[in-house]
Amino acid sequence: MAQLPVPDHPLLLAATRDGEDAAVYKINDDQALVATVDFFTPIVDDPYDYGRIGATNALSDIYAMGGVPFLALNVVAFPYGKLPDDVLITTLKGGAATCAAEGVLLAGGHTVTSPDILYGLAALGFVRPDRVVTNAGAKPGDALVLTKALGTGVIQTAVKRGECPPQTEKAALESMLQSNKAAAAAMVAAGAVCATDITGFGLLGHALEVATASAAGIRVFASRVPRLPQAHEFAATHVPGGLKTNRKFVEPKLNVAEDVDEATVNLLADPQTSGGLLVALPPERAAAYAAEVGGAAAVVGEVFASSSPTLEIAS
């Protein structure tokens, strides 16, 4: 990706140059368009839940930018003749149900034949140009709030190996199906200017994107990070390939306190599907924001001045 040209335009307010979750294009002084596309292979067996998760995950990119999604298109690859057509129909029904619940018009889409099934959305939203939330707005002294618990990656790996209790699998599913709509609205109301959603790069990978774009350091307090049931246990025994890739990516910029164990570092690098928001706010607003979001939301870290992008894991 580093070999590709970096998009640059006076009306392009956010894009890939700072690892943003979505592109933002200014239409006029009162309105900007937020655009994203996201899709992936099934991570659950139930096609309906797969569709719901895929749509929830894609719309989260809009919310992470402070936007409100209004229009979406299905993005589908399907192995026609190898799986029953009902699998595709049920997946699309799941995505449609999520879009309807979020107030998003699902207006069609595009399907291609593929050896593997893929599902997600191309989605559009609106945001005020002066209220765009980006990776680049974190300031030294800001507190960091994480709105969902970690562990969907290691839990799904345990599920695939037939070694995950039903109640743990259910907790992960409920987390992935939880919309970031309310958390994003509260984030905007709190005046946040910096946030990202935690997905494939894990908490550490996405935090490094924020640190890089904001030219700052980020410190995560491991003991404060919310965890799904058995997530810490599975982070030691059920390590997905994406987790290893994430750790390799952040390793050059990462400092870990001696009393932080290996499983905890793994969990912080665990690739999440439809994860929560990581929001930077002045400390006097952070606790109130976490309380308003509720659930697993917690103040998990802080931003500090640094001459180069740096990640620290403290106990």
Image (cartoon, rainbow, N blue to C red):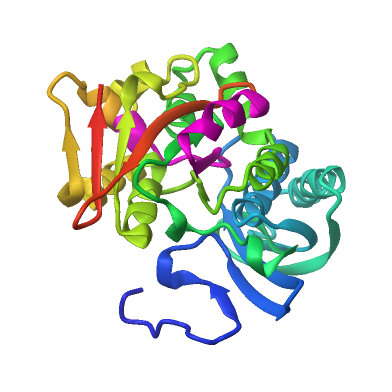
The percent coordinates of residue 3 (x first, y second) are: 31, 81
As rendered, which of 129 and 67 lies closer to the eye? 129
Viewer-side residue, 107 vs 59: 59
Residue 5 lies, with reference to residue 292, above or below; the image says below
Q: Position of residue 291 (x, y in %)?
A: 62, 23
Q: Please, which residue is most extreme toward the front here?
A: 284
Q: Residue at x 16, y 27 (%)?
A: 257
* Viewer-nearest residue: 50 or 191: 191
**Left or right: 201, with 74 as reference point:** left
Side of 94 relative to 23 (left or right): right
Using residue 105 as the reference point, say whether residue 269 is left or right of it: left
**How many marks on residues?**
0
Q: Is residue 283 magenta?
A: yes
Quadrant of the image for the C terminus? top left
Residue span colored magenta: 266-293
Which corner quadrant of the image does residue 231 belong to?
Answer: top left
Residue shown at 61% from the left, 34% from the top: 176
Q: Residue at x 34, y 18 (%)?
A: 223
Q: Position of residue 180 (x, y in %)?
A: 66, 41
How far from the left and from the top, in percent, is residue 207? Answer: 37, 46
- Residue furthest left in the image: 258
From the viewer's perspective, is residue 53 above or below residue 293?
below
